[in-house]
Amino acid sequence: MAHHRGMIFWIRRRRRDKRRAREASWVEERVLLTADSECLAVVFEPMGAVYEIQPGGSLTIVFEGPATHPGGVEYRADYVSVAPGLVGRMSAFDSVGDEIDLETGVPY
């Protein structure tokens, strides 16, 4: 019976260690997007919502996810595409700090 308790303890400890390791490997990255003289369209993938940064304005994208790929920003011909990593999270904030709804592209 002692053997089984030791084995169960080892599995629980290993799970706890894996969880701690997974949390430690996550990062938060912030990307600041700005628009100079023209509006800049930002498309939130995979939702497809669009947010327009007005000239002189900015948008802060916050990616949370694995250090290997928390998220990405891609410049296209006439817009910027932003997407979280496969298991990450993404949020966006306008120039005054209001959070943007990623489903609609409108501040909450």
Image: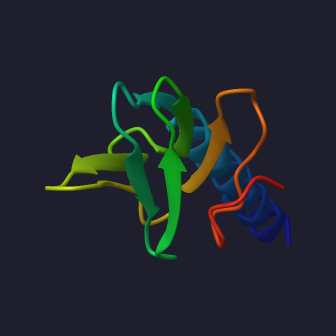
Colour scheme in use: rainbow
Q: Residue 86, how many percent across, how many down?
A: 42, 66
Q: Is residue 92 left or right of residue 56?
A: right
Asked if residue 84 can be seen in this view, the reply is: no
Nearer-the-camera pick, 20 or 84:
84
Q: Is residue 15 left or right of residue 49?
A: right
Q: Is residue 72 above or below residue 36?
A: below
Q: Residue 19, how many percent across, how many down?
A: 66, 50
Nearer-the-camera pick, 37 or 8:
37
Q: Residue 4, how many percent across, how many down?
A: 77, 70
Residue at position x 43%, y 68% from top? 45
Residue at the far bottom in the pictured view: 47
Nearer-the-camera pick, 5 or 96:
96
User: Which quadrant is home to the N terminus?
Assistant: bottom right
Residue at position x 14%, y 56% from top? 77
Residue at position x 56%, y 33% from top? 60
Q: Is residue 4 above or below residue 12?
A: below
Q: Is residue 52 above or below residue 98?
A: below
User: Which quadrant is home to the C terminus?
Assistant: bottom right
Q: How many marks?
A: 0
Asked if residue 22 can be seen in this view, the reply is: yes
Residue at position x 39%, y 31% from top? 35
Residue at the far left in the pictured view: 77
Nearer-the-camera pick, 40 or 101:
40
